[in-house]
Image: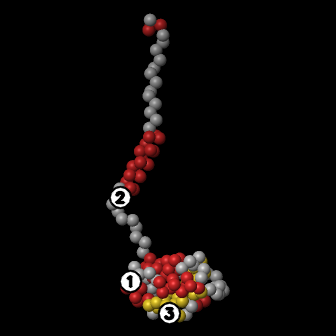
Amino acid sequence: MNTLRPRRPPEPPIAVLAPLVDVVTMLLLVLLRAWSTDPPAPFAPQELDPPTALGVGSPPRLTEVALGRAGIYLDGQRVAATAWHLDHPDALLHELRTPLLQRGVDRVNLRADASLPYGLVRKTLLALREAGVEEVVVLAADRGSL
C-alpha cells in the first residue's frame, strides 16, 4: 500500500541556533566579567587639575571655607592645621563641622590650594555634609587671573 502514495523528499531539520548562540555568548560574557581576577581600574585623583572658571563675575557672598597649605580657614579664621589632617587621614574635621553647626550654615564657598591632595578636599566635603550644608560652591581661579 505504500506504493500508492508518492514519496516526498524528507524536509531538512530546522535548527534554531541563532538565539541560543546569543544567549550563550551573553552568559559567557557575564561569567567572565564576574570572575575576573583583574582589580578595578584605580581612580587617580592626583591627575586632576584644579578647575578654571568659564564665567565672569564674582561668586555669591557666602560663608567661606579655605584649604591652604598652612591651615583650614573658616571666614578668614584658622580652625585647623592642614599638616595634622594630612598626617591623620582617618580623623574627621570636627574643628570645621562644629562652628558650621552652631551657625546653621546651609551654603558655603570652598577654596582649595591646587597642591593639596584630593583626600583633604574629600574630608572637608564630608565635614560640610555632616554640618548640614546643602550647597557647596567650589571656587576656581578665573581666566583673567592666570
Residue 126 visible in rendering: yes
Q: Residues within 10 Å of mark 3 (few under 14, many from 20)?
A: some
Helix, strand or loop under label 3? strand
Q: Residue 19, how many percent across, how many down? A: 47, 41
Q: Residues within 10 Å of mark 2 (few under 14, many from 20)?
A: few
Q: Residue 119, how many percent across, how many down? A: 44, 79
Indicate the amino acid at tag 3: Arg
> Is residue 105 toward the left or the right of residue 121 in the image?
right
Indicate the amino acid at tag 1: His
Helix, strand or loop under label 1? loop
Quarter in which the C terminus is drawn: bottom right
Q: Residue 132, how many percent across, how many down? A: 56, 77
Looking at marks 1 and 3 on the same chain, the residue that comes earlier in the sequence is marked by: 3
Q: Residue at the spot x=35%, y=56% of the render?
A: 35
Which of these two is toward me, 19 or 94? 94
Looking at marks 2 and 3 on the same chain, the residue that comes earlier in the sequence is marked by: 2
Per the image, the residue denoted by label 2 is: 36
Which of these two is toward me, 106 or 51? 106
Q: Where on the picture, by quarter, is residue 59?
A: bottom right
